[in-house]
Amino acid sequence: MPDTLLFAMEATLNGLTAGVMYALVALGFVLIFKASGIFNFAQGVMALFAALTLVGFQSGQIPFAHLINAVFGTRLHQFGWNMPTFLAIPATVLVMILLAVLVERYILKHLVNQEPIILFMATIGLAYFLEGVGDIMWGAEVKALDVGLPKGMSGAVDDITFAWFGYGFYIDRLELWAAGIAGILVASLTIFSQYTKQGRALRAVADDHQAALSVGISLRFIWVLTWSIAGIVALVAGIMWGSKSGVQFSLSLIALKALPVLILGGFTSIPGAIVGGLIIGVGEKLFDFFMQPVIGGATENWFAYMLALAFLLFRPQGLFGEKIIERV
Amino acid sequence: MLYREAGDFKTSYTADSQTFPIRFDRYGYYFLLGFAFLVVPLIINDYWANAIVVPFLIYTIAALGLNILIGYCGQLSLGTGAFMAVGAYGSYKLMTAFPDLNIVFVIIASGVVTAGVGVLFGLPSLRIKGFYLAVATLAAQFFLIWLFTRQPWFYNYSPTGMISAPQREVFGVAVTGPRASAVAMYMICLCFLISLAWLARNLTRGTLGRQWMAIRDMDIAAEIIGVNPLMAKLTAFAVSSFFIGISGALLFTVYLGAAEAGEAFGIDKSFLVLFMVIIGGLGSIFGAFAGAAFLIVGPVMLKLLLVNTLGWPTDLAAHLEIMIIGALIIVFLILEPHGIAALWRTIKEKLRLWPFPY
């Protein structure tokens, strides 16, 4: 087999695994958009915040140490113990749930019935706020996150592909795990929304706010629930991205990368988020692979958006989105 | 009574449709203009010019431009940073290609170039709207910045990838380059701002502005009553990008002097200008001024308070600043969705009725 084809296949595989990572972030967007019609720009920062909190708990950092030191002139940094991962993750989940409650109480409640664009901007404000809080709470330096997931080249894939093609593909084991976890996440979300009482209530709210209210579903509880789930999805995305490239500010920028994923998949479709993520992941890797000699590298920065833009012109509602109907 | 229409008789239609119908407002406006042109140049120094006044003037132009697009025409754009970069790189290419061309024409021409690019990226707005359009403008943001950092033609193959503004003069006074004085920088920005604000005000209350507002309020209904959505949206993109391009050109040539696209015109600039428009007030000329003033002066004040007075470390102050900006946006959206401009309107209304509000 010619080398170019092999390299292209490797790029495709890498694109698939990268796409899973995009899809993880996009999932959180879709959940909130379905349940409350809010386009939650803060999803990426929530992933960053969750990862920061997890690292902070694991390493026993004192929250707001920097601020306390500045105000009182003390020199606090560490509690002096390390929290094991199996405790730190539930603790972080609790923090994300608390965050959901606060967001509902102090922001969403006051913005009911506002235009979507106002809500969107409120989430931009929330993103900035959370970013500042995260930095003040845990410090802004790049942190390594290790929850015990395997890293490095996957030997099995290398062996198999070497046996088939005489050329071993490089696939990060972490990304294989990410794919598996994303699969479990989607499956459990689907089961939750299809077969549990709260999940059905959630779908009812997504379908029609007023009708759901009139049959006695508490809108506020459902919103807290959705934001909590989105927070947990953000935690999973944060763990994956944090293990891959360290917990740092650029983590929150993956939210921007999730936008074209959403456009492709449609704002309201969970399978769409996955498929969109895969298309974007493969597309940008292959585009970079073939076009790099012609127009230079780093096309990953914009390819996804251009693809989404071109796609929008032909199918404004996305691959799996509901048809947009407008009335005067 | 000071703040009344009473006794101020209008004898012509022109007088009746003026921007400031209340005499007190009018005099206040003339006073401010006089102050800005005659007094400030005498007292301005390098610190004030660099820290507050010049960035305020330049960002006000950008906020005016974005306000036309979002506030008047209802098209959400997150590509402001990139359009500013188009203005900056346009002016750089023009300055280096035509060294004898007057800087004023260079800046206006780079505004025109940006208008062209804006129309190009505004084309999708005919089919898509809302968040989808925001993503389309993100495409502009990332693609253009990539273009300016990766394609050497745009930065004249300079080894650092930076562009730097050579010295140019207006009436024999250096306004760009390292030898430009604070007064010269201030005056050229002020002249551009005043003429553009005048243009924006008059465009938005004319036919074009009414078409934009009709599109904003409901595009299908606007189309039915005879507004051409193609023309309205594209002109909004063109005018808005023209403003933003001029502000980018001024930011690069006059204020920064040297710039690198990814750093100076990244997506955070897009958000900064968006926040100015939201906090100032969507669909208001005054709002652009107020929002820019708020977001330029606020951080400086906060930094002065925290770092210089309380002695906190600068990184902590910077994080607190982001947090406060975020919180303010949420507070404004909840309490006063129409921004500082709406507060100002309420105050004026109260003032008119004072002292008998009932």
Image (cartoon, coloured by chain):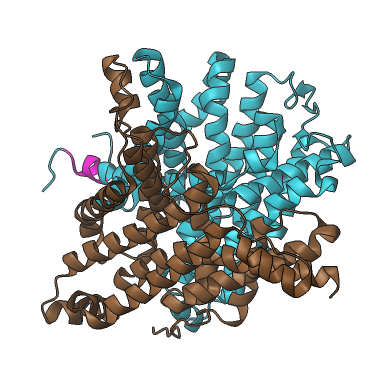
Q: Residue at x 40, y 26 (%)?
A: B317
* Viewer-nearest residue: A96 or B140: A96
Above or below, A268 against A95 in this view is: below
Above or below, A171 against B352 in this view is: below
* Viewer-nearest residue: B51 or B108: B51
Q: Residue at x 62, y 56 (%)?
A: A153
| Predominant secondary structure, magenta span | helix
Q: Residue at x 36, y 66 (%)?
A: A116
B26 vs A62, left or right, is right
Q: Which segment did they paint magenta?
A: B349-354
* Viewer-nearest residue: A51 or B46: A51
A139 vs B186, left or right, is left
Assign the N terminus of chain A to one quadrant of the image: bottom right
Assign the C terminus of chain A to one quadrant of the image: bottom left
As drawn, the chain in cyan is B
B310 vs B112, left or right, is left
As drawn, the chain in brown is A
Question: In x, y percent, where is residue A182?
Answer: 44, 68
A196 vs B300, left or right, is left
Q: Residue at x 76, y 35 (%)?
A: B162
* Viewer-nearest residue: A113 or B22: A113
- Res. B23 image quadrant: top left
Question: In x, y percent, where is residue B135?
Answer: 54, 64
Q: Answer yes or no: is residue A138 visible.
A: yes
Q: For residue A20: magenta?
A: no
Question: In x, y percent, where is residue A44?
Answer: 44, 54
Question: In x, y percent, where is residue A21?
Answer: 51, 62
